[in-house]
Image (tube, rainbow, N blue to C red):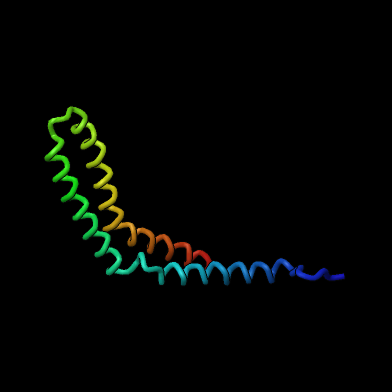
């Protein structure tokens, strides 16, 4: 006797694979992979950097400013790396997983 809502394992596996493939298509169409999005984020990064330089100029006399700058620079560098290269890394990983599924 077959219960309602119960599918065989093969049907579930096929729908799961189709669901994964749909997720890949959605991810590849995501706006975060577009050059316009990265350009906007890069402009925001530069503006934030200019504002940070101006703020550091005015508060440079405080002793804790140097320590704050030692935290700010690595975080800004990581953010710049993510803006410039993370989309390529993510696309490569998506392609590897997609090739494994096929």
**Residue at 83% in and 70% down:** 2
Vertical side of 80 occupied by 33: above or below: below
Vertical side of 55 occupied by 39: above or below: below
Relative placement, left or right, of 80 versus 19 is: left
Task: Name the foreground residue: 5 vs 52.
Answer: 52
**Residue at 12% in and 31% down:** 61
Residue 14 location in percent, x, y? 63, 71
Relative placement, left or right, of 70 versus 58 is: right
Residue 86 location in percent, x, y? 33, 57
Q: Quadrant of the N terminus?
A: bottom right
Residue 39 location in percent, x, y? 24, 64
The image quarter in which residue 75 lies: top left
**Residue at 38% in and 64% down:** 91
Residue 22 location in percent, x, y? 52, 71
**Residue at 61% in and 67% down:** 16
User: In the displayed image of the protein, which residue is found farthest to the front?
Assistant: 58
How many numbered marks appear?
0
User: In the displayed image of the protein, which residue is found farthest to the right?
Assistant: 1
């Amino acid at each position: 006797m077959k219960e309602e809502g119960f599918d065989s394992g093969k049907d579930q596996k096929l729908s799961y694979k189709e669901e994964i493939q749909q997720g890949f298509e959605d991810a590849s169409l995501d706006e975060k992979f577009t050059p316009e999005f990265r350009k906007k984020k890069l402009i925001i990064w530069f503006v934030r950097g200019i504002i940070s330089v101006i703020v550091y100029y005015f508060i440079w006399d405080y002793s804790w400013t140097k320590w704050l700058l030692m935290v700010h620079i690595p975080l800004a560098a990581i953010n710049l790396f993510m803006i410039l290269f993370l989309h390529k890394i993510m696309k490569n990983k998506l392609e590897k997983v997609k090739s494994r599924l096929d």
